[in-house]
Image: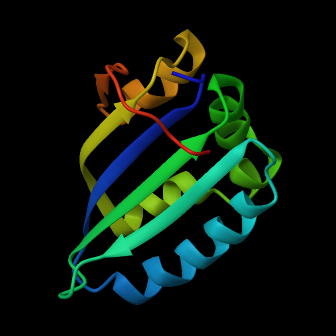
């Protein structure tokens, strides 16, 4: 409704990788915190540590692309390290991402949901 693009990644943590994944999460959160178009980047974990949800909200599609092609993202090989620790089980994307943002989300197997009603205060 306002150009923002959000999604929820549902992840299955691989056996024996929880501590490594926690360290990686802290690095990734620290890196995302400095990106002006990243509005929220929140991680949630199940009580047993086996499932993680990452809730991401970006100002627009350009911010989605900037997050994924940023120098820090590439240099630290976060994507490769991420996939060593967890399997993506579901991605629900919200809003109207443009073709370049969809290209990124398509790699994750995203299901798209267009705005239908409601509001956001940010």
Judging depth in this view, the residue of 70 and 3 nearest the camera is 3
Decide if residue 98 is on the left or right side of residue 102: right
On the image, the x and y values in percent for residue 63 come to 70, 33
Residue 60 found in image quarter: top right
Q: Is residue 59 above or below residue 81?
A: above
On the image, the x and y values in percent for residue 2 come to 59, 24
**Colour scheme in the image?**
rainbow
On the image, the x and y values in percent for residue 111 come to 26, 27
Tag count in the figure?
Answer: 0
What residue lies at 54% left-to-right and 73% top-to-bottom?
25
Give the quarter of the figure containing the C terminus. Answer: top right
Q: Is residue 42 above or below residue 15?
A: above
Residue 40 found in image quarter: bottom right
Q: Is residue 23 above or below residue 97?
A: below
What residue lies at 74% left-to-right and 41% top-to-bottom?
37
On the image, the x and y values in percent for residue 33 come to 74, 63
What residue lies at 66% left-to-right and 49% top-to-bottom?
39
What residue lies at 31% left-to-right and 19% top-to-bottom?
116
Q: Is residue 48 above or below residue 94?
A: below
Q: Residue furthest top?
A: 99
Decide if residue 114 is on the left or right side of residue 98: left
Residue 10 found in image quarter: bottom left
Judging depth in this view, the residue of 108 and 36 nearest the camera is 36
């Amino acid at each position: 409704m306002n150009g923002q693009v959000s999604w929820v990644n549902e992840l299955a943590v691989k056996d024996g990788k929880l501590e490594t994944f926690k360290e990686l999460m802290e690095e990734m959160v620290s890196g995302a915190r400095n990106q002006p178009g990243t509005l929220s980047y929140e991680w949630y974990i199940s009580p047993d540590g086996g499932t993680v949800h990452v809730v991401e909200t970006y100002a627009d599609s350009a911010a989605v692309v900037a997050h994924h092609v940023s120098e820090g993202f590439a240099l630290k090989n976060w994507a490769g390290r991420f996939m060593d620790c967890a399997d993506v089980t579901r991605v629900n994307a919200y809003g109207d991402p443009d073709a370049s943002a969809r290209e990124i989300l398509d790699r994750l197997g995203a299901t798209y949901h267009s705005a239908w009603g409601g509001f956001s205060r940010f």
